[in-house]
Amino acid sequence: MSGERTLILGANIYDYGTDAGSWRTPGEDPRRPFTADFWRDTAHDAERAGMDAIFLADSPGLSANPAIRPMRLVEPLTALATVAAETERLGLISTVSTSANDPVELARRLLPFSAYSGGRFGWNVVTGVTGPAVTDFGYAHTPGRDDRYLRAEEFLDAYTAFLAAVREGTDYVHEGPLFAAAIPRRELGVDPAIGALLPDVAPVIVQAGGSPRGRQLAARTAEVVFAAETVRETAAQNAAELRTLAAGFGRTAPLVLPGIHLIVGSTEEEAERRFALIHERGPEGYLLQRFSAMFGIDSARLDLDAPASAELARLSTDPASSPVGFQKAIAAYGAQGGLTIRALLRYFAGFGHQFFVGSPERLVDIMTEWADAGAADGFTLLFDSNPWGLREFAEHVTPVLRRRGLLAERPAEPFGRWVRGARR
Amino acid sequence: MTAHILRLSDDTLARLAGTAAGDIDTRRALGAELDAIADVLLLGDGPGGPDRTVAAGFLLALTRRVVVVPIIGSAQHPINLGRATAALSSLHGHRGGIASDDADVLGLLSRLWETWPSDSLIGDIDAGVYVDDSRILRIADPRYPTIGGPLTVPVDVTDKPVTILLTATHTLHEPGVDLALDISTLAHWAPGAVRRDARAEAGSARAVLGLAPSTSIAHGTPAFHGAGRLDQV
């Protein structure tokens, strides 16, 4: 790797894991993610693996029937408080949806969280709300992409204005079409002792949106982007475009941390066996159903042995609730490799992120190539099964990263501060 | 037993953020002190105001036996509040609860905690059966017609988080409200206060407060059960 740049690494702990079969990991107790010990152990595993942060994905309600696939269950701020209590340096990034919260109420929650963690907190801004939660949060139907981003844009404006009022000790006023409030300075609801810790306790803004509007929002507001990318050249182009967009807003570009769903083994064959051990425990037909839903396709119409590019062009309907970044990333991988739908379905085990099964050395080679190409400042790592995947990473990949000088000794300052300092 | 309940003011909670953000030894000392000063910590000056659920999460993570009950501050959505409280209770040995002057909200939360009964979790990894999804419910509360869950965290219906109604009249009418409390009668904690015996066994909030097991009060319909299950991915 050229220069002296090191990689920023986050562990995306998807409770049981990213694979749909993860809750059936042999020898693990499916009740364990509901205990503090699971999160304490995860905290220590992440530190041992050389992670800079733990990242928790989330949905405000059950986004799927847990009888099919249990996921995104434990509320992330509660889990991360346990992680924070066990660690001193690890960053703590929680997903929170703008469609299921109020900007002032959320700011009143996130500021003390960041203060209690010592300025180590990041907010992954998402816009989604699905399933029964749609009704719970007062929507007549699932909000479409434009409506969600309209709300997210104003939400972030109101949230930012509230943080400014707390920091400066002024009244808060926001008059917008979706949010409107005027709060005198003495009733802001954030203790001055916490307000005095700004800007260090201002949550790092993380975003993952891959639609044109999502990328605009990231360029305008994000400090870190959790990108869905599968093709290095495309990722480098997108990162360069993000830097240009951010400059257009007069901002330093966000750090770009693409996701990698990874399974490692000492050899390629061992990694394949390890992948199959968990993956084959997933529900039959699950990947095809998720794939079809993401592209808005009737799965019965898919020819599994047809070229993926032609088949997606013929059948895809771009449903408004689907994540555009994942759609684009998966379609791009199919096109680049000339894959059939069947071959692309295997790759879709990473659900839109780069999917890797192989040796630690080859994984680190890829990470290095991506960083050298300007496609990544680091990576958000997703493991098929927790805690297995993170522990295997610590055992097999971390030593390779250390040998190659890719893991940094971070400065003794809060996560939020050094992340902001690392932006280019 | 009569539980010893102490209040932690909003000022104190803000100051504790500095201690909680310190090194691990400092945090552990704080946790040990909080475990020793009371059986129950009630967080906040009163209804409304700043959020205290976040502080509750950190204090529960730092302690091992004391029960921690935040007073609902600014208007957090009941689904988010119910989910966070359920998660805290599950992670920390049922040592959590919630307090408010709004009996309707407490009743709604108590019902939401029945949307995923923990004994429906089967977790048979060999057979591939995670849960009896016919028991995951969307509940109906006529005072909140659009809110029904289910929450994302299983809850033991016999050991739900405690719900404390803040009132001076000490009358209970709302099903799902466990306890009425006049907070003006409670002392505030000051760091360095006289310690109690912290060696006592940890117990659930209900046991510490001398409450009977909670019972089911919700009515609901299955949220997922039925045909087309693979559409529910």
Image: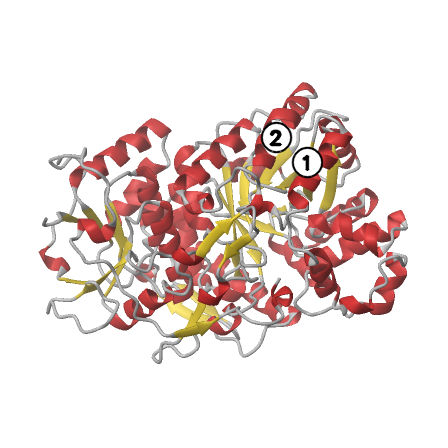
Q: Residue under mark 2: which chain is it in?
A: A
| Residue A350 appears left or right of A108 | right
* Residue B170 drawn at (x, y percent): 11, 67
Q: Amino acid at mark 1?
A: Arg
| Residue A349 appears left or right of B204 | right
- Would residue A198 be visible to someone looking at this image? no
* Residue on which the image places disc 2: A392
* Residue on which the image places disc 1: A274
Q: Amino acid at mark 2?
A: Glu
* Residue A87 drawn at (x, y percent): 44, 32
- Relative to B141, say whether B131 is above or below: above
Q: Quadrant of residue B165?
A: bottom left
Residue B182 is labelled as none
Estimate the spatial distance between the alpha carbons at disc 2 and disc 1, rounded to whole Å.
11 Å
Q: Residue at x 88, y 57 (%)?
A: A305
- Relative to A268, say whether A140 is above or below: below
Q: Quadrant of residue B20?
A: top left
